[in-house]
Structure formats: structure tokens, C-alpha cells
Image (tube, rainbow, N blue to C red):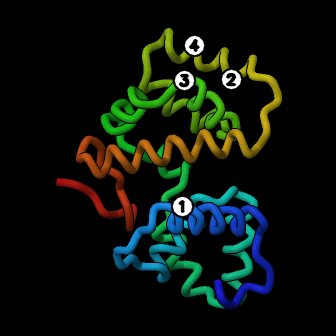
């Protein structure tokens, strides 16, 4: 972050909200405030445009750091890579409205993974919801995706689903 020449406005707002929350709650515990892991979490919470701009800029300055960040980031695209059992568990926890909005940016081939993991009637209704949805702000779509990411991370921490990270060659036996 220190090498960037400009900072996206939404990032500054996120920092301001976090600082305000920390001041109000008076959190006195020691916390990690820097590092690659923290930065990957910040980037994951940013809008796609800002995230992409930051990573592109960082790649020009420090390609190795950019690669580290990308490997740690968990994005909505990673949700679509969940195994079927984990995806089904996740879908039970998500509001249909959030799912429909989140899928607005996803191409049809990736939507099929979702459709095959819900009932046939549910898939038909979801397709209809997406088709009939009025134009939606990008920020609303990204907020729905972040909500789904938060639920995914919660379910992983509870041990209910498994998120594959790291090498795609890595497999379970």
C-alpha cells in the first residue's frame, strides 16, 4: 500500500469505517495491522474495479508481492469452484435475492454449476429471477457477492464446508 501513488475512494471509506468502529468499541487487544494476509482481506472486500486497479499497479511495482496477494485472496469466482457438497451447504444459507444479484455478473456456463446443485424448480425460478431483474447497480451486485463470501468463510470456520486453496493439483484422498 505504501508504494501506491493514489488510493481508491472506496478503500479510504472502508478504512475510515474500520477506524471509527475500533475507536467506538475501544478494542485494546493486539492485532496484526499489516502484512500480505491483511492486504489480501482488504482487496477481497474492495469492488472488482478497485481491486483490479490496485493489483495491476502493484504488479508493475512488485510482481512477486502481487502474486502472493492473489494466491491468498478468496473471491466470488472461488465460490463457484467449491465441490458440489460444499456448494449445496452454502446455497442453503444464502437468500435467493442475494444469489440472483450475485450471479448477475457471472456467465451462463458458471451459473450452470449453481443450477445443478439446487432443485430443478429452484433453478428455473432462479433463472427467471435473474432474467426479470431490473438493471442493478454494480455496487449492489458486489455487495451480494461479499455477503456470500462472508457466509462461505463462516461455514468453512465452522467446518461445514471445505474451501480448496493453493495448487489446483492438490487433491484429497
Q: Is residue 41 visible?
A: no
Query: Secondary structure under badge 2?
Result: helix
User: Is 114 located above or below residue 124 in the figure?
Assistant: below
**Of tags 3 and 4, which is closer to the observer?**
3
In the rendered structure, which disc, 3 or 4, sits on the residue that comes first in sequence? 3
Query: Secondary structure under badge 3?
Result: helix
From this viewpoint, which residue is outermost toward the top? 121
Residue linked to disc 1: 21
In the rendered structure, which disc, 2 or 1, sits on the residue that comes first in sequence? 1
Q: Residue at x 38, y 67 (%)?
A: 167
Q: Quadrant of residue 155?
A: top left
**Of tags 4 and 1, which is closer to the observer?**
1
**Of tags 1 and 3, which is closer to the observer?**
1
Q: Position of residue 11 (x, y in %)?
A: 69, 66
Q: Position of residue 122 (x, y in %)?
A: 50, 14
**Of tags 2 and 1, which is closer to the observer?**
1
Q: Quadrant of residue 17?
A: bottom right
Task: State yes or no: discs 3 and 4 in contact (Cβ < 8 Å).
Answer: no
Residue linked to disc 4: 124
Q: Quadrant of residue 110?
A: top right
21 or 111: which is nearer to us? Answer: 21
User: Is 109 located above or below residue 11 in the figure?
Assistant: above
Query: Secondary structure under badge 4?
Result: helix
Q: Residue at x 71, y 40 (%)?
A: 140
Residue density around tag 3, few if under 14, some if 14–19, many if 20 or more, within 10 Å: some
Query: Label 3, label 4: how many angstroms apart (C-alpha)?
Result: 12 Å
Residue linked to disc 3: 96
Query: Label 2, label 4: how many angstroms apart (C-alpha)?
Result: 10 Å
Query: Label 2, label 3: how many angstroms apart (C-alpha)?
Result: 10 Å
Residue linked to disc 2: 130
From this viewpoint, which residue is outermost toward the right? 135
Task: State yes or no: discs 1 and 3 in contact (Cβ < 8 Å).
Answer: no
Amino acid at each position: 500500500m505504501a508504494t501506491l501513488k493514489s488510493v481508491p475512494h472506496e478503500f479510504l471509506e472502508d478504512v475510515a469505517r474500520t477506524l471509527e468502529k475500533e475507536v467506538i468499541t475501544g478494542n485494546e487487544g493486539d492485532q496484526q495491522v499489516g502484512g500480505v494476509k491483511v492486504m489480501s482481506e482488504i482487496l477481497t472486500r474492495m469492488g472488482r474495479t478497485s481491486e483490479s486497479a490496485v493489483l495491476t499497479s502493484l504488479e508493475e511495482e512488485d510482481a512477486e508481492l502481487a502474486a502472493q496477494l492473489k494466491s491468498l485472496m478468496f473471491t466470488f469466482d472461488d465460490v463457484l469452484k467449491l465441490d458440489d457438497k460444499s456448494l449445496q451447504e452454502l446455497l442453503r444459507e444464502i437468500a435467493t435475492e442475494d444469489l440472483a444479484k450475485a450471479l448477475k455478473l457471472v456467465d451462463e456456463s458458471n451459473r450452470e454449476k449453481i443450477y445443478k446443485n439446487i432443485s430443478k424448480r429452484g433453478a428455473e425460478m432462479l433463472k427467471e429471477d435473474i432474467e426479470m431483474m431490473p438493471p442493478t447497480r454494480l455496487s449492489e451486485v458486489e455487495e451480494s457477492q461479499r455477503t456470500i463470501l462472508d457466509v462461505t468463510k463462516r461455514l468453512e470456520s465452522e467446518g461445514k464446508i471445505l474451501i480448496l486453496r493453493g495448487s489446483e493439483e492438490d487433491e484429497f484422498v
